[in-house]
Every structure is written in structure tokens, then in C-alpha cells.
Image (cartoon, rainbow, N blue to C red):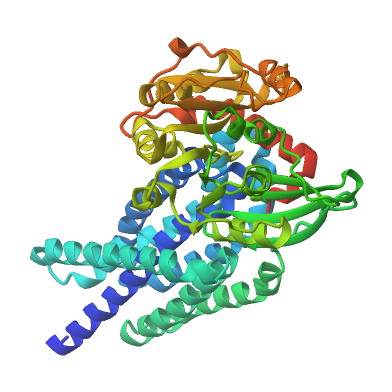
Amino acid sequence: MNKKSTLYNHIALFFIVFLTGASVMVIELLGTRMIAPFYGASLYVWSSLISVTMIALAIGYFVGGRWADRAKRTGLSLIIALAALFTLLIPLMTRTVLLATDPLGLRTGAFVSALVLFSPSLTLLGMVGPFAIKLSTSQLEGVGNSAGSIYAVSTLGSVIGTLVLGFYLFPMIGSRQILVGLGLLLLALAIVVALYEQKKCNIPAAMLPSVLLAIVGLSLLPKIVGAGHTYTGGNQFKIQSERESLYGWVRVIDQPARDLRLLTADASTIGASGISDGESRLSYQDIVGLIPALAPNKMQRALIIGLGAGHMAKVLQDRYGITTDTLEIDPAVAEAASRYFGFKPTGQAIVGDARYEIRHLQGPYDLIIHDCFTGGSEPAHLLTVETLTQLRGLLADQGILALNFVALQGEKSVALASVSRTIAEVLPEQTVFVSEPGKDFNDFIFLASRQHIDLNSKNLLSDQKAWLQQRIFPVDKALGLILTDDLNPLEHLQTAKAEHYRRFIVDWFGPDLLVR
């Protein structure tokens, strides 16, 4: 074989491992979007996907190496064609697998789902590297150079695949469509490789397996494309809007029998109002709506982190004349709040990540409402000393921070105690209210300030004072620990809460809401 032909062979192999390396990361990242609506976008889902990817690649490297030694320089096209077929099957199998693993619980269910759905294609893609090394090595002394080059190009493909998916593809195309497109791309690659194997290796039958698998994949395509399940709501619910964003499936769901409109993100209800009057139906917001009356001076400016349906901004404007800046990470949520819940900004309406955006905000704010609850998991990085210190820097001297936190079994909740202790590290004065006294699963509203908060303020009516007094909740800070960017086990502490909330949503809406 001459040098020119050898160069072309190496370039072709580099192209193959580049594409398959990119495919590995695309499948891994899209895996979270396939599983997250059902099990939440929690650390457990990410850990499951990463673990399954590593397991599959390890098996692929081992099996691929043994196959390459025995295959007499052919078989790469078959590996890629099989990977393509299993990639195409992922959207077709997702609904069945998720429903089947539901009884296993949050952690085990997420791991088993990831293992069943993604390990076949990832294992086969892992086999490409050893096979490519075998094909690119003509003598023993070149093994090190060949292996290093192959894995470097494969890793570069993974980097490019990650960036292209996250920055360009995913914001424009749904996760199922991307998986179908990837499967078709791998099928086309398998056919090209099979043609090469048939011509260069003089194996007439090299094309047959890839062609057969391509035919199978294409024949399944109508079923795969039609497999995407759309939640209809049945007889009780009516879907007003549904959109997949970078952060989850955002839906507006009406329940006419209860005059109720809900805003959901995956397994979380993040807003609720009456269909007829547009008024909020979330009871904890009744507490938050009284906070400006507790301030010694008139509040003029507020910040809400976690927009939800936007009701709090409306209350602050209509009841107190407060101008409110809002900060929401998900543009689909912000759009739904404006279109279906009547949200109208009275200050800046910022769409972005809170940790980044609050560094660029200009205070002072008389009131900061921190309301970033999700059913699957709280954004733990927003509940650390470091984040709360940033928020303190935006507070006026007599300003109040209101933080909504959802917990299970409040009096025994280490998570609740940890949030309380963390807030106390930043702001000395603290009062905690419970949304619905007597219930184990509840919203807890922390009010914190540099100054004493007067619950007997003259601005409150007598019945409002009594109503608030009934909801004061004692928290034993000694049960908790201080949450920091370095040490924050909040997701682990909230596992029971996340599973309880997920079961509540499934029982209310049915599992179809969480399955695509």
C-alpha cells in the first residue's frame, strides 16, 4: 500500500472516530432529556447517565479489541450499523422502559432506564476505537501513535458534538428528532464504510449486513417518528400549551372542573391560578403577599428569582405599587407566564441563570423573593452561603429576603434545618412560616433580614396578624449543616421529598404527563 493510500485510509478512520465520538456525547446528553421528565433533572439522573456511559464504553473497548483481533480487517461497518439501529430504537423504547421502571423508585429506576435505553448503542460506539486502531496499525512499533491519534480525534469529536448539541441543535430541534437524525447519519456512515470494506478488503458480502440493518431501521422509521407520545390530559385536563425547552417540558394545563390552570415544568407544578379570575391558587404566595406590610418603611423595589406564573410580581404592583425585577432561567416559562397567566413586567424581565445574572444586578432591593422550587430537585447551588451572600449584597439595609423551600416532614427535616442554618450565616434575623399547618409535605417560607422583623406591624390587619401567627414554624437549626458551594448534600437530603412529589404528580395527572 503506497503512502498516499495510507494517508487517505488514516483520514477516513479519523473521520469515522470523530463522528462516533461525537455520537457518544450526543446520546449521553440527550439521555437526560429523555429521562428527566419522568425522574427529574436531578443529580441521580446525571449520575446514572454518566455511569452507564462509562460502563458501556468500557465494555465496548474490551469487546471491540477482541473482535478487531479476530475479524481480519472487516466488521467496522456492522458495528456502526448496529449502533445506528439501537440509537433509532431509543425513542421507540423510551415510554415502555420508563413506565416499566417506575416501581423501582427514583435512583434505581433512573439507573435501570439509562442502562436499558442507552448502553446498547454506547457499547457499540465504544467498539469503534479499538477497531480503528487495529486498522490504522501496520506494525507493532506504530501501535502507540495510532492509539493516541485515534482517541485524540474521538475525544475531539465528543467536544464538538457536545458544543454543537448544546449551543445549536437542542435549542432548535427536539430531542427525539435529534436522536432519529443521529441514527440515520450513523446508518449512512455504515453503508459508506461497508462499501470501502467490500472494495478494499475484497469481501463481496461485506455490504450485506449493513444494508439489511439499514432496511430494518428505515422500516421502523414511521413507528419511531410516531412514537412520540403527546399528553392529552384525558377527560379531566386540557392542554393549552406544550413546549420543550433546554430545561424541561413546559406545559399549561387546565382542569375546568376545578377552575384551575397549572404551569408545569416536567414533574413540577410551578404556577397555578383560577381560569375564571386569574388569581393565584398557591397558598404560600398568600404569605409572601403580606411581606411588604411587615417592613418599617414603604418598599419600592423588589427582585423575584424564579418567575413561575408571575403572580407575585402582579400582587406587589397592584397591592403595594412596588416595581419588580424578575429573573427566570427558562424562556419557555417566561413566555407561558406572559401568554397564559397575564404576567406583565413592571421592571426588568431577565431570562438567564441566577448565579450569573445576580452578579450583574444593581441594588438595593427592599425585597428579594427566592422561589426556585422544582418537584424533582431544588437548584442546590442557589441555596448556599455564597449565593445568599450575593443576595445580601443586593438588599437594602432594612430589606427582607423571602425564600420558599419545599420539604417533607418539616420538624424532622434535616434539609429544612440546613437551609435555616445557612440563611442564619448570612442574615441574623429569621422567621419561618409553614404554608398549610398540619401537613407533612409543605412549603416553608423563610423571612430573613439584617433587622428585626415585626410581625405585629401596624400595617397588618388584626386577622392578618392572627393568620400569620398560626403559621409560624419553629426550626431546630442544630439538626442541619451549613450549605456551601464546596459541600452541599441537599439533593441527597431531599430524595424522599422528590419521590413523594413525583408520586403525587403521577397520581394526579397520570404517568403519561411525564413520558414522551
From the top left corner, tell me how far across and down residue 436 is, in percent. Answer: 72, 24
From the top left corner, tell me how far across and down residue 307 is, in percent. Answer: 58, 49
From the viewer's side, name the closer residue of 300 and 283: 300
Please give left or right for residue 237 compared with residue 380 in the image. right
**Residue 126 sits above or below residue 496 on the image:** below
Q: Residue at x 81, y 52 (%)?
A: 254
**Residue 101 sits above or below residue 427 on the image:** below
Q: Residue at x 53, y 73 (%)?
A: 181
From the top left corner, tell me how far across and down residue 516 is, in percent. Answer: 67, 57
Q: Residue at x 73, y 20 (%)?
A: 462
From the top left corner, tell me how far across and down residue 321 is, in percent. Answer: 61, 47
Q: Could you say which quadrant of the image residue 21 lies in?
A: bottom left
**Observer able to see residue 85:** no
Q: Could you say which quadrant of the image residue 498 lies in?
A: top right
From the viewer's side, name the closer residue of 125 and 397: 397
From the viewer's side, name the closer residue of 63 and 320: 320
